[in-house]
Image (spheres, rainbow, N blue to C red):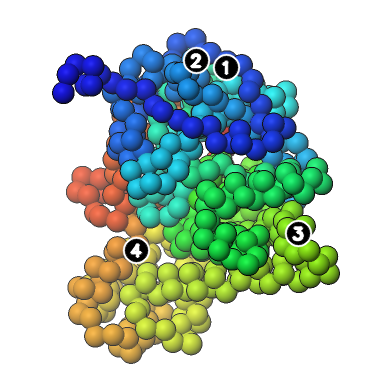
């Protein structure tokens, strides 16, 4: 290879979103920052996307990741969407602090979009500054990469860049920009935005774009719109069930924060639950508990109903048939959620065979956990030890668990014939040892914001990249918070 071939190469991106009507996006000017510096580049993800990590880490790459200047062929846009926020419809939202740089095709042949979050004001900023504070950028980077390591569909973090500028929130905070990767940034709110214009041709164009990106097999269906809706419903039901199995609370499940891809998107006031309590809320503004842990399936279905409403004109030429078909598609949510959630619970408890009484067994465990204020992650991890499975160790859990443990061990005897170690190993593969403990995340953010020390961030990222394996020397990352360490609220930084 000659020197020119070995030189770092800028990305080659398409801007597929501009195939859609011009009123769905804005090509506003860039908003350069004063002194960008690379905090972290996800080299593994860059390689997966076919991007040159050397170029991204160099001066031109840093300029792109900071939103200061773009290489030839990269034409960023801010996209428009609407949304129900806490149940109230806002017809004009959009990327108020994000720029969609374009899309690439990864090594697996999948299209992936690259977006800057915190890149400055756009036509959709609604008097906001369009910026992001350092803390929320680090939280989203850490939590989205943890979610990926847990095997749950999610947007990914490609890079975090400090801006050298301050953003005004309750106090002045250091600014940062996150580079986010998603299979698309299409939301339920995107369809709401287009549907509100009562332009059937534009709605059909958006649907065709979404199907081509996410569900090309739907084109083989006699009713592509209905098939697309059914598949989005199934993907979201599966996603929320998988959140629930690891104690994740999204925090703000507005319709503009639900991706039709079935990926977790928009990590704002989100968190993983420590002490098990189905009413747990982490968003300071969610006073009524609309987006509490236990409400997430209900809210997901509510959001999907708004998607069905937006798609109604495309479901059938017969106006009377449209709501019937919409209800048919939506009816699949509970079945899919139930299947994924309860099969997941069986796996977490080492059960291979289904029994009708299993749901009562699961409910009794969760009730005991709530009554004893047990740590969710720690409880399931303790159950994954061979000595607990066999009853040799009664000290791993509080005495109040004894009646349930006896009931569980009797149920295990009715299951398959795996030896305890093999069963325990299978359980440890689905019960994480490590989650992003809120008190440790907050301490990591304080270290970065107040001292400019990113060592805790890097350490947490390394530990959480392998959440199912115990890592000697990192035991503290598996421990629940002390009484004076509990975090009640997390914040999105807008």
Residue depicted at x 69% and y 39%: 81
Residue identified by numbered label 3: 312
Q: Residue furthest top?
A: 34
Q: Earlier in the sequence, mark 3 or mark 2?
A: 2
Residue depicted at x 25% and y 74%: 423
Marks 3 & 2, CB-CB < 8 Å contact = no
Which tag is nearer the camera, tag 3 or tag 4? 3
Residue identified by numbered label 2: 68
Residue 357 percent location from the top left of the image: 48, 87
* Residues at marks 1 and 4, CA–CA distance in whole angstroms: 44 Å
Secondary element at image label 4 = loop
Q: Residues within 10 Å of mark 3 (few under 14, many from 20)?
A: many
Q: Earlier in the sequence, mark 2 or mark 1?
A: 1
Residue identified by numbered label 4: 430
Query: Mark number for residue 30?
Result: 1
In what quadrant of the picture does the C terminus appear? top right
Using the rendered view, name the quadrant where residue 65 is placed. top left
């Amino acid at each position: 290879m000659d020197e020119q071939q070995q030189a770092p190469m800028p990305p080659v991106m398409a801007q597929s979103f501009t195939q859609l009507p011009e009123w769905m996006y804005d090509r506003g000017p860039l908003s350069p920052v004063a002194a960008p510096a690379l905090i972290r580049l996800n080299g593994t993800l860059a390689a997966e996307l076919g991007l040159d990590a050397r170029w991204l880490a160099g001066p031109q790459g840093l300029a792109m990741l900071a939103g200061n200047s773009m290489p030839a062929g990269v034409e960023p846009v801010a996209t428009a969407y609407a949304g129900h926020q806490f149940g109230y419809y806002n017809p004009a939202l959009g990327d108020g602090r994000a720029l969609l740089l374009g899309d690439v095709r990864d090594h697996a042949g999948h299209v992936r979009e690259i977006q800057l979050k915190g890149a400055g004001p756009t036509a959709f900023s609604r008097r906001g500054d369009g910026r992001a504070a350092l803390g929320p950028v680090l939280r989203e980077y850490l939590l989205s990469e943890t979610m990926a390591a847990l095997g749950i569909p999610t947007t990914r973090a490609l890079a975090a860049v400090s801006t050298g500028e301050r953003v005004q929130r309750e106090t002045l905070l250091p600014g940062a920009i996150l580079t986010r990767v998603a299979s698309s940034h299409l939301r339920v709110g995107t369809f709401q935005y287009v549907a509100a214009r009562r332009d059937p041709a534009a709605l059909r164009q958006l649907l065709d774009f979404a199907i081509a990106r996410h569900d090309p097999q739907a084109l083989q269906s006699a009713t592509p719109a209905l098939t697309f809706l059914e598949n989005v419903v199934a993907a979201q039901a599966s996603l929320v069930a998988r959140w629930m199995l690891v104690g994740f609370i999204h925090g703000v499940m507005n319709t503009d924060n639900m991706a039709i891809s079935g990926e977790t998107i928009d990590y704002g006031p989100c968190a993983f639950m420590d002490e098990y309590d189905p009413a747990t809320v982490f968003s300071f503004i969610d006073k009524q508990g609309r987006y509490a842990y236990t409400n997430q399936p209900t809210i997901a279905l509510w959001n999907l109903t708004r998607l069905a409403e937006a798609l109604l004109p495309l479901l059938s030429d017969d106006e009377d048939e449209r709501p019937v078909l919409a209800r048919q598609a939506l009816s699949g949510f509970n079945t899919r959620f139930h299947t994924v959630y309860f099969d997941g619970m069986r796996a977490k408890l080492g059960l291979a065979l289904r029994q009708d009484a299993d749901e009562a067994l699961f409910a009794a465990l969760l009730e005991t956990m709530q009554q004893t204020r047990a740590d969710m992650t720690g409880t399931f991890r303790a159950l994954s030890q061979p000595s607990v499975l066999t009853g040799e160790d009664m000290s791993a859990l509080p005495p109040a668990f004894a009646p349930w443990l006896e009931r569980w061990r009797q149920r295990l005897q009715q299951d398959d014939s795996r030896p305890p170690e093999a069963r325990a190993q299978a359980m440890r593969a689905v019960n994480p040892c490590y989650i992003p403990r809120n008190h440790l995340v907050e301490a990591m953010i304080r270290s970065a914001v107040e001292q400019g020390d990113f060592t805790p961030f890097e350490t947490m990222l390394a530990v959480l990249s392998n959440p199912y394996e115990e890592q000697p020397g990192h035991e503290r990352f598996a421990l629940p918070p002390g009484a004076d360490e509990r975090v009640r609220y997390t914040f999105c930084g807008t």
